[in-house]
Image (spheres, helix red, strand yellow):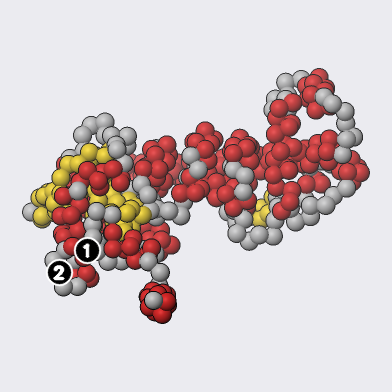
């Protein structure tokens, strides 16, 4: 008994020390990265101020790189190309720098890094770093400091707008993206899709490339122009329920698939699964060949409700346990409802571990109503038309 107790105590001690070591290593890596960014930013400023004002002749940067290597044998990361990237790094952010006006002579008189005036307080490490770029309170300063220079290169090379760059900085940091994964995201214009489909794909799908493909597969809104509620035999269009809409979709399943994408294969509607004595009926079930995953589409006639996510998560769990084949990716769920507050959907999606998104749909009647002028304008047009006769 005493031996077991001692073993438990030793195990706890090892775990505590290991955690302390890993946390210390992580902080040290952050400090190294932040110091490197500060150095590169300062060098970028120095090179920009001098070459931009014509103080150096053609080929000066190449010569500086060559001379640096001679002065510091074994020095890496200061090729002509990399020094030019440092210049672009500085020039990408200089316009939002708090104290952006610094004279060239001042740069020459002081240490390159000191003149960068890069400062920020990291709440996690409780230490003051050398990065203070902007007074913009929404600027992701912690993320900026903790992604690599390679990540920054991908961002300023392919993302041109300020808000877009902020988005990719935060995304790279939050999801621990590799630089090549980030570059793919930028080239795929993920920023333009970010507000379209509320989803949790990057949190729920470990493979970031698969998460990106999943995001690109779905739209935020679908026009089901073959559904006209006026043709459905009900007294009030509001009485149209999910089953009626579903039956119209099934009747026009080819059009529905084309709306969603050619990679979808229809597997059935009201697919029944019995789990531990409980019945589950999936509205529409597909398989996507590009994602190599089953896709559930749940139809809702009204506005989004948080309870829909719990229902969908249960379906995805059952499919992954009972239906998914070896080599296939986890099932994906889409709630298709009449309308949704995207910010609210994103908020409630945070705690779900199954990949889900919420899209909206419009029927032919909705589309016609959007195209028609307001009712008062219609009456005025009719009245004026009558007066002219």
Look at the numbered disc 2 and give the secondary structure of its residue: loop
Q: In this view, does 313 lie above or below 52?
A: below
> Which of the two residues, 163 or 372, is positioned nearer the viewer here?
372
Residue tagged 2: 234
Quarter in which the N terminus is drawn: top left
Please tell me how many numbered marks the rendered image carries: 2
Badge 1 crowding class, 10 Å Cα cut-off, few under 14, some 14 to 19, many 20 or more, is: many
- Give the residue drawn at x 81%, y 36%: 47
Would you say residue 351 is visible in this rendering?
Answer: no
Q: Mark 1 points at which residue?
A: 229
Do we see residue 105 in this rendering? yes
Q: Residue 339 occupies which quadrant of the picture?
A: bottom left
**Is 82 left or right of 13, judged from the image as shown?**
right
Q: Is 32 on the left or on the right of 103, as rendered?
A: left
Real-space Cα separation, disc 2 to disc 1, in angstroms: 8 Å
The C terminus, quarter of image: bottom left
Q: Position of residue 315 (x, y in %)?
A: 21, 51
Q: Where is residue 163 in the image (x, y as percent from the top left)?
A: 59, 53
**Nearer the observer, 374 or 68:** 374
Which residue corresponds to the image point at 16% horizontal and 50% vertical from the top-left?
251
Residue 105 image offset from top left, x and y in percent: 91, 44
Query: Which of 86 and 261 lies nearest the eye of the viewer?
Result: 261
Measuring from the top left, give residue 55's x and y in whole percent.
90, 34
Are there few (<14), some (14-19), or many (20+) residues within 10 Å of tag 2?
A: few
> What residue is rendered at 36% in x and 54% in y?
221
- Do residues under tags 2 and 1 come within 8 Å of each other at their CB atoms? yes
- First along the sequence among labels 2 and 1: 1
Where disc 1 sits, the SS reads: helix
Q: Which residue is located at x 20 percent, y 41 percent?
A: 266
Image mark for residue 51: none
């Amino acid at each position: 008994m005493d031996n077991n107790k001692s073993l438990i105590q030793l195990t706890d001690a090892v775990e505590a020390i290991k955690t302390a070591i890993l946390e210390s290593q992580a902080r040290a890596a952050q400090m190294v990265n932040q110091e490197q960014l500060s150095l590169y930013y300062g060098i970028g400023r120095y090179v920009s101020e001098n070459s931009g004002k014509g103080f150096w002749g053609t080929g000066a940067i190449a010569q500086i790189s060559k001379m640096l290597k001679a002065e510091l044998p074994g020095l890496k990361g200061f090729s002509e190309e990399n020094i030019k990237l440092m210049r672009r790094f500085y020039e990408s952010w200089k316009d939002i720098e708090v104290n952006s006006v610094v004279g060239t002579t001042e740069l020459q008189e002081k240490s390159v890094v000191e003149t960068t005036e890069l400062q920020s307080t990291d709440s996690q490490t409780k230490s003051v770093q050398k990065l203070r770029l902007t007074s913009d309170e929404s600027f992701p300063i912690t993320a900026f400091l903790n992604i690599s220079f390679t990540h920054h290169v991908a961002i300023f090379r392919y993302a041109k707008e300020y808000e877009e760059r902020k988005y990719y900085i935060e995304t790279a940091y939050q999801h621990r993206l590799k630089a090549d994964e980030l570059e793919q995201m930028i080239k795929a214009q993920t920023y333009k899709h970010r507000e379209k489909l509320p989803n949790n794909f990057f949190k729920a799908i470990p493979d970031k490339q698969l998460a990106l493909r999943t995001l690109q597969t779905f739209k935020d809104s679908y026009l089901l122009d073959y559904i006209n509620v006026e043709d459905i035999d009900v007294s009030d269009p509001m009485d149209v329920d999910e089953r009626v809409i579903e039956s119209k979709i099934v009747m026009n399943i080819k059009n529905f698939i084309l709306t969603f994408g050619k990679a979808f294969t229809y597997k059935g509607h009201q697919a029944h699964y019995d789990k531990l004595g409980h019945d589950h009926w999936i509205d529409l079930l597909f398989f996507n060949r590009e994602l190599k995953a089953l896709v559930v589409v749940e139809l809702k006639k009204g506005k989004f409700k948080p309870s829909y996510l719990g229902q969908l998560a249960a379906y995805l769990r059952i499919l992954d346990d009972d239906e998914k084949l070896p080599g296939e990716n986890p099932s994906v769920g889409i709630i298709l409802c009449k309308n949704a507050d995207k910010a609210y959907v994103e908020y409630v999606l945070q705690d779900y571990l199954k990949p889900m998104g919420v899209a909206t749909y419009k029927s032919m009647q909705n589309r016609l109503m959007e195209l028609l002028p307001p009712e008062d304008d219609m009456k005025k047009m009719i009245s004026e038309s009558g007066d002219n006769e």
